[in-house]
Amino acid sequence: MGRSLALTQALLSLATLSAAVPVAIPRGISFKRVASGNSTDSISWGPCPESYPPSVTCATYVVPLDWEHPDSNETIELGMVRIQARDSANRIGNLFMNPGGPGGQATSFLTSLALSPTAIDAQIRDHFDIIGLDPRGVGLSTPVECDTVTLNGRVSYFPKTQTEFEELVSFNKAIAESCRAKTGRLIDFVDTISAIKDHEAVRKALGDEKVTLLGLSYGTQLFSQYAELFPDNLRAVILDGNLQHSQGESSNMLIESSTYEATLKHFFEWCAGTTKDACPLAGQDVQAKFESVLAKATKAPIPAPGCGDGSCRSDQTEEDIRFNVQGYLISTASWPSLGQALIEADAGNATLISRQQPLAIDDAYEDSYLTAGQAIACQDWAHSSTTLADLQAKAMLGATFSPLTKGACQSYRIQTFCIGWPAPLSNPPRRVSYTGDTKILMVQSTFDPSTSYVWGLGLHAEIGEDRSVLLVRNGSGHTSYLQGGETTAVMNAYLLNLTLPEPGTVIQSKP
């Protein structure tokens, strides 16, 4: 589903038009904050730490831990950043952006956009206060924290024996126990519905004006469910790279793994047919190279010597490779690097592939894509498998319909790493029921390796053709807004003046 650091890195890579720019965010920063979490309070923006660009301001806001008991003394803090509208006289309003995940830091995402003046259209920068609010548990908000050593442990998510299955369950429970010990009761209240109510509280505190929302990947779940709960508070909504939060476990695994595999094959075709300058495997059988890497990793894990600093795993198993290559496909800008990664792995060095899934580094902000990402997913997505037979049946499903990747994808990983998770499934899968008058713009690429075109069509049907328009980009890559080109121009037209494309519009994109 694109719910990993790979998504955030890829989006920031697009945003900066080169490699992702690391943003140094010091720990222990105390931003100006309001006196209480009451929704009638206002939010006061203040200067950010020196490591932030001057165009960004920062704030915090206090909200209840449990929205079912808002008068309780238990509270958490939300952290956010803002890029202020440059043309205040012609300001349209607040534009909330969420980069996905779950666990993706909106604050880091927005800061990286601020560092690249051309990443967002000048008119968007002129007319909107752009807000990056970290969901509860994530980034600058009160974080989910877990024991780093435990979190970085290793286990197979495709167990073949009862012993391996029991090791998986024990591993999951050990992580969960460490998260609860370090995080406290927040671990039970990081579901998306709670995050939506946080966003609504912040919207009110920022002046109670109608809001414009742009959600990428998991952000489409966040903001589609926000639209369901608060339909009258919307000016405009874009859902880009859609999650359909209503499918069953097997369907989600099949849908995501098959779109991953289809995009992988699209990469094989592109790389083989392009020039050496564009892809180092040009003119070769790229699928055969991929299969060769998997075969070698099946015999013995392939070393990753560049991970000796502990930032990533020191070797890669066949299973690791099948999971991690998905991250390379998120942005077509990374496709040449994937070609190089396969060459090096086939020669015995899997460092580039291992770096697609960095390990936790014992930093609450940086690690929240892992810690909060897992905690949120386990409260939002079904994980009913309880036996080895259950997982083996899913493995057969994956191997049958996605023989190259064998079902390895974010959906399957969630279904397995949430086995034994102690927090309740607070926001179980169900259809979105939207009744608002604001027409939603949905955007979906056909070769999205993480959020399938199938989910885009499904969520569009749930919201309704009378309340949404689906814009299709016929091309590759996860989400479209930061790709630039005609699709982005159509999205900006909607953000600025609410102009929607004609239903059935398809925009051609390369590759």
Image: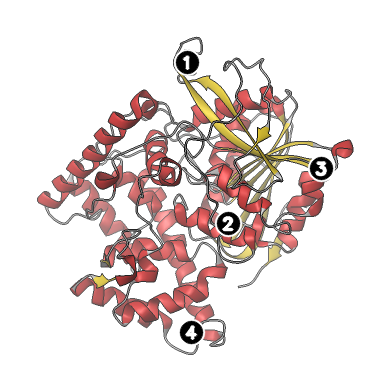
Marks 1 and 3 sit apart, C-alpha to C-alpha, by 36 Å
Q: Relative to 194, does residue 326 appear above or below in the rendering?
A: below
Reading the image, the residue beneath label 2 is 12
Bin the neighbour count of mark 2 within 10 Å (Cα to Cα): few under 14, some 14-19, many 20 and up: many
Bin the neighbour count of mark 3 within 10 Å (Cα to Cα): few under 14, some 14-19, many 20 and up: many
For marks 2 and 3, the one nearer the N-term is 2
What's the residue type where badge 1 is placed?
Glu
Left or right: 128, with 410 as reference point? right
Task: Name the residue nearer the viewer: 239 or 374.
Answer: 374
For marks 1 and 3, the one nearer the N-term is 1
Marks 2 and 1 sit apart, C-alpha to C-alpha, by 35 Å
For marks 4 and 3, the one nearer the N-term is 3
Reading the image, the residue beneath label 1 is 68
**Secondary structure at numbered mark 4:** loop
Task: Name the residue nearer the viewer: 277 or 257.
Answer: 277
Residue 403, image quadrant: bottom left
Closest to the camera, between mark 2 and mark 1, is: 2
Task: Name the residue nearer the viewer: 392 or 78.
Answer: 78
Q: Position of residue 102 (x, y in %)?
A: 47, 43
Bin the neighbour count of mark 4 within 10 Å (Cα to Cα): few under 14, some 14-19, many 20 and up: many
Q: Are marks 1 and 4 in contact (CB under 8 Å)?
A: no
For marks 2 and 4, the one nearer the N-term is 2
Left or right: 435, with 86 as reference point? left
- At horizontal 16% and vertical 57% (from top left) the residue drawn is 160
Q: Position of residue 409 (x, y in %)?
A: 38, 56
In the rendering, which numbered label is found on residue 160?
Answer: none
**Secondary structure at numbered mark 3:** helix
- At horizontal 50% and vertical 43% (from top left) the residue drawn is 26
Marks 2 and 4 sit apart, C-alpha to C-alpha, by 24 Å
Reading the image, the residue beneath label 4 is 280
Q: Position of residue 173 (x, y in %)?
A: 22, 37
Reading the image, the residue beneath label 3 is 127
